[in-house]
């Protein structure tokens, strides 16, 4: 999409004001050649890259192996499907027999024979219906079970991947693996897989019966059908490309709409409605045109098989009528032949479609297998140890860490924090503070070194004990879209409303909760968006309070928290800290001042640690930070 000139920004003014910036943001996120949303979905892991080079057959084999539900009962389903095909083939033969032996035979019209043959054909048709229905139901059931199983397995694998994999820009891709990528397998699992067996059997068997009746007529029919195959394939390629465009266009419209909905405040505040509307119109128009193009190819392709079928029938009738006697062809055989030609039409027109379904499925499996092949590096111990009661000491010994992308983030940390102390970890943005917090609750293992909590290597601690005794309040205070009380209850599933009330009360937060519309039953919105970041952290503190953690990790919000909430947070934390080890990732001077120990992190290393007053006297990194804090406070 071309960038329109910025009509709202006077070109001669060098100063860029907020309005320009907003317009720019709106412009630069335009879905150019596939939306933002699409681009995110194309991110690949190294495992996916490796699979990219694997052959189609390898992927197909591994894909089917990763989807055991697909093979369950496949033998019986395949058998049923082949029986159905054989039954279809029997109908023309029965018709031929009726005509040649019951109507036009040497003994003239035989009412009894015709009646029996007709009844047999009718019965066969009913049986065929039942068989068809049974096959189809089995196929759909197996397909849905396959998709469900694959979704669950992929999802639980993604959940078990350490945070080293959960890079922001990969999130969309990971979501797509579980949703749309699994969906691409639907057609193949529902029909394509079995159709390979059924259609090829039907094709070969029909041709064989045709050849038995008359090899000459078989050649006539083939002469018409053979050119149809490449033609169908070519048309289908074009149709597929057109539908790819449709999918991209739909993705474009979707991201456009979702961005404009979530960006509504900016759009309204800066009066950008006209521009937003033009961009949305363009996206919708693109989608409309893409749909029409796709439909054009479909409308050419759809009647084509019928057209060729009619030509083949006509050719067979003509050739049969002219040469029938010379080729030793009876009337009944000719009629049966016409039915057989019709029967041939289905597998021939389906072949290209199945080929396509298989290709799509292989592409989907390639992506899903890539995720499933990504190793889970946080393995839970068998018979894990329990953390001791009471406050927990923390020891870092030569701890190093790197995310999957980018260089080393923690570069050899050594630190001893005695049980029961209050610690403030401070440092520039991006220095690695949140990463330390993540390692302390084992969202990932260090790439080198050991994290010990309560004297135990975290890798040896049973997950239940770790979850119960180590609690983290995340930096963005993520909450689930559920009532406040349910979010708090995640700290202890059996907690009653009274317990939740008590948790807030013990942190001195009853007043705050009572002021919320609905109290503890207030809805917090998606990601907790109805509350401010600081308020979300209050909820997370109440959640921690419901358990009995020996180590509490608070990752303070980077964004400013209003003074009232900040005070509430500090008070709540003070109360929660009694008898516990508390590690606060501090962005505020007050937190550092109150702590027993301040740990200063700089570019992934601990450069200073000690009490606030002592560090201040040293005139090092900490005193520099302190100066800038003081400056900010004065400016504020
Ligand atoms: N999921 C991730 N994948 C790759 N790199 C990451 C990831 N998360 C963080 N990083 C990088 O690791 C480094 C340390 O990040 P971290 O979040 O620990 O910093 P921080 O000290 O908490 O910063 P802030 O004060 O802004 O919260 C940064 O350079 C960051 O870009
Ligand atoms: Mg952080």
Image (spheres, rainbow, N blue to C red):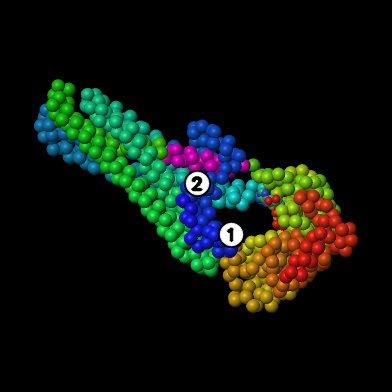
Nearer to the camera, 384 or 253: 253
What residue do we see at 53% from left, 67% from top?
Answer: 270
User: Which residue in the structure is indicated by mark 1?
Assistant: 14
Q: Which residues are magenta?
A: 357-374
Single out the mark in the foreground, 1 or 2: 1
What residue do we see at 34% from left, 50% from top?
Answer: 292
User: Which residue in the structure is indicated by mark 2?
Assistant: 181
- Does label 1 or label 2 sit earlier along the sequence? 1
Asked which secondary structure carries label 2, the reply is: helix
Nearer to the camera, 208 or 298: 298
Asked if residue 151 shows in the view, the reply is no
Q: Is residue 571 left or right of residue 80?
A: right
What residue do we see at 52% from left, 39% from top?
Answer: 366
Distance of mark 1 from mark 2, alpha carbons? 47 Å
Please rate how many residues cluster around mark 2, counting C-alpha atoms within 10 Å: few if below 14, some from 14 to 19, many from 20: many
Q: Is residue 213 above or below residue 533?
A: above
Nearer to the camera, 553 or 37: 37
- Residue 175 screen position, x and y as percent: 55, 51
What kind of secondary structure does the magenta stretch mostly adopt? helix
- Residue 519 screen position, x and y as percent: 62, 75
Q: Quadrant of residue 429?
A: bottom right
Q: Is residue 237 above or below residue 399?
A: above
Q: Quadrant of residue 232?
A: top left
Q: Is residue 388 left or right of residue 127?
A: right
Asked if residue 40 shows in the view, the reply is yes
- Residue 364 screen position, x and y as percent: 49, 42
Asked which secondary structure carries label 1, the reply is: loop
Please rate how many residues cluster around mark 1, counting C-alpha atoms within 10 Å: few if below 14, some from 14 to 19, many from 20: few
Tell me if the residue at label 1 has its CB under 8 Å from ligand 1.
no
- Residue 332 screen position, x and y as percent: 17, 32
The quarter of the rendered structure image containing the C terminus is bottom right
């Amino acid at each position: 999409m071309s960038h329109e000139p910025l009509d709202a920004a006077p070109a001669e003014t060098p100063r860029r004001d907020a309005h320009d910036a907003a317009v720019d943001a709106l412009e630069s996120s335009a879905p150019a050649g596939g939306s933002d949303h699409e681009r995110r979905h194309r991110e690949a892991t190294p495992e996916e890259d490796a699979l990219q080079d694997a052959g189609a057959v390898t992927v197909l084999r591994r894909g089917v192996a990763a989807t055991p539900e697909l093979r369950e009962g496949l033998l019986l389903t395949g058998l049923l499907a082949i029986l159905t095909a054989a039954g279809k083939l029997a109908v023309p033969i029965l018709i031929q027999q009726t005509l040649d032996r019951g109507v036009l035979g040497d003994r003239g019209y035989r009412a009894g024979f015709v009646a029996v043959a007709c009844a047999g054909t009718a019965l066969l048709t009913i049986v065929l219906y039942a068989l068809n229905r049974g096959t189809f139901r089995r196929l759909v059931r197996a397909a849905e079970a396959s998709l469900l199983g694959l979704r669950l397995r992929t999802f639980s694998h993604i959940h078990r991947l350490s945070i080293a994999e959960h890079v922001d820009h990969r999130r969309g891709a990971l979501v797509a693996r579980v949703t749309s990528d699994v969906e691409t397998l639907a057609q193949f699992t529902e029909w394509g897989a079995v159709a390979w067996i059924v259609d090829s059997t039907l094709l070969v068997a029909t041709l064989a019966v045709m050849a038995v009746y008359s090899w000459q007529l078989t050649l006539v029919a083939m002469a018409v059908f053979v050119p149809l195959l490449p033609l169908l394939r070519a048309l289908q390629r074009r149709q597929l490309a057109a539908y790819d465009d449709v999918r991209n266009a739909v993705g474009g419209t979707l991201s456009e709409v979702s961005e404009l909905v979530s960006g509504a405040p900016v759009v309204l505040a800066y009066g950008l409605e006209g521009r937003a509307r033009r961009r949305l119109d363009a996206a919708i128009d693109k989608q409309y045109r893409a749909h029409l193009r796709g439909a054009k190819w479909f409308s050419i392709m759809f009647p084509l098989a019928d057209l060729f079928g009619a030509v083949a029938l006509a050719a067979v009738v003509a050739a049969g009528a002219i040469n029938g006697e010379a080729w030793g062809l009876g009337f009944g055989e000719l009629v049966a032949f016409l039915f057989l030609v019709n029967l041939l039409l289905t597998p021939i027109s389906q072949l290209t479609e199945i080929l396509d379904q298989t290709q799509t499925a292989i592409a989907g499996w390639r992506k899903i297998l890539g995720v499933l092949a990504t190793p889970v590096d946080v393995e839970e111990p068998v018979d894990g140890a329990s953390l001791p009661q009471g406050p927990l000491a923390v020891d870092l010994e030569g701890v190093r860490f790197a995310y999957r992308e980018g260089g080393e983030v923690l570069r050899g940390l050594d630190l001893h924090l005695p049980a029961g102390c209050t610690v403030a970890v401070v440092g520039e943005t991006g220095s690695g503070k949140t990463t330390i917090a993540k390692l302390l609750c084992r969202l990932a293992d260090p790439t080198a070194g050991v994290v010990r909590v309560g004297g135990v290597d975290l890798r040896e601690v049973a997950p239940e004990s770790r979850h119960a005794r180590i609690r983290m309040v995340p930096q963005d205070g993520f909450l689930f879209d559920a009532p406040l009380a349910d979010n708090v209850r995640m700290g202890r599933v059996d907690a009653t409303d009274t317990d939740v009330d008590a948790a807030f009360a013990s942190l001195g937060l009853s007043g705050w909760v009572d002021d919320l519309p609905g109290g503890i039953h207030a809805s917090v919105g998606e990601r907790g968006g109805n509350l401010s970041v600081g308020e979300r952290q209050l909820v997370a503190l109440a959640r921690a309070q419901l358990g009995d953690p020996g180590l509490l990790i608070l990752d303070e919000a980077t964004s400013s928290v209003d003074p009232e909430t900040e005070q509430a947070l500090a008070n709540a934390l003070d109360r929660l800290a009694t008898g516990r080890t508390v590690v606060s990732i501090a962005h505020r001077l007050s937190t550092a001042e109150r702590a027993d120990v301040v740990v200063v992190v700089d570019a992934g290393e601990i450069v200073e640690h000690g009490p606030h007053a002592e560090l201040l006297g040293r005139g090092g990194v900490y005193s520099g930070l302190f100066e800038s804090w003081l400056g900010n406070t004065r400016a504020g």
